[in-house]
Image (spheres, coloured by chain):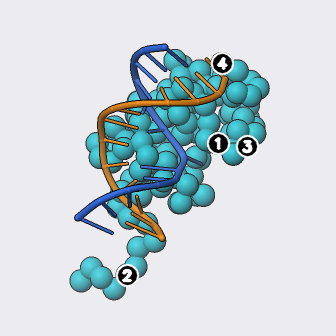
Chain colours: A cyan, B blue, C orange
Amino acid sequence: MPDSDSQALDDYSARVLDVVDAIPVGQVMSYGDIAEYLGSGGPRQVGRVLATYGGGVAWWRVIHSDGTPAPGHEAVALAHYLSEGTPLRSARPPVRVDMRNARWAGR
DNA sequence: GTGTTGACAATCA
DNA sequence: CTGATTGCCAACA
């Protein structure tokens, strides 16, 4: 029965990481978008999951609705955007992604 | 069980 | 751009 194995991630966390991992190169999703895409929780829960387990996924593709990357990682995120060809509105701080073109809705 | 905090979002000043 | 305010949901003390 289902209790011998210990899961490192909760079902919700696994779904969040799965969606982030599914974001194509050059595109991004906002915290609220992912929450809405999953149909549960909220943007804060997505942020918490990424802050805790996001070490194995492309967290830099998950940004605020304004198009700004997570705090404390602007430089890291910017390096990835330039490397992956993500459409930017501002290539220097405050770093802003062009959500109009970079936003990914699962398609 | 209550209150605070948080890798949020939207609106107003 | 900064700051304040409200709404949202879950983790944590």
Asked if the residues shown at circle 2 and circle 4 are in contact, with their CB atoms under 8 angstroms apart, the answer is no
Amino acid at pointer 3: Val
Residue at point 42% right, 42% down?
Answer: A43
Which residue is under mark 4? A89
Which of the marked residues, 3 or 1, is nearer the chain's N terminus?
Answer: 1
Foreground tag (2 vs 1): 1
Whether callout 3 and callout 1 share a subunit is answered yes
Q: Quadrant of the C terminus of chain A?
A: top left
Q: Residue furthest bottom?
A: A4
A48 horizontally vs C8: left or right: right
Mark 1 belongs to which subunit?
A
Residue at point 41% right, 50% down?
Answer: A45
Mark 3 belongs to which subunit?
A
Q: Quadrant of the N terminus of chain A?
A: bottom left
Amino acid at pointer 1: Pro
Q: Secondary structure at mark 2?
A: loop
Amino acid at pointer 4: Arg
Amino acid at pointer 2: Asp
Which residue is under mark 2? A5
Q: Give the image quarter of residue A90.
A: top right
Mark 4 belongs to which subunit?
A
Asked if the residues shown at circle 2 and circle 1 are in contact, with their CB atoms under 8 angstroms apart, the answer is no
Which residue is under mark 3? A76
Say which of A54 and A64 sits in front.
A64
Whether callout 2 and callout 4 share a subunit is answered yes
Which of the marked residues, 3 or 2, is nearer the chain's N terminus?
Answer: 2
Q: Is residue A72 visible?
A: yes
Mark 2 belongs to which subunit?
A
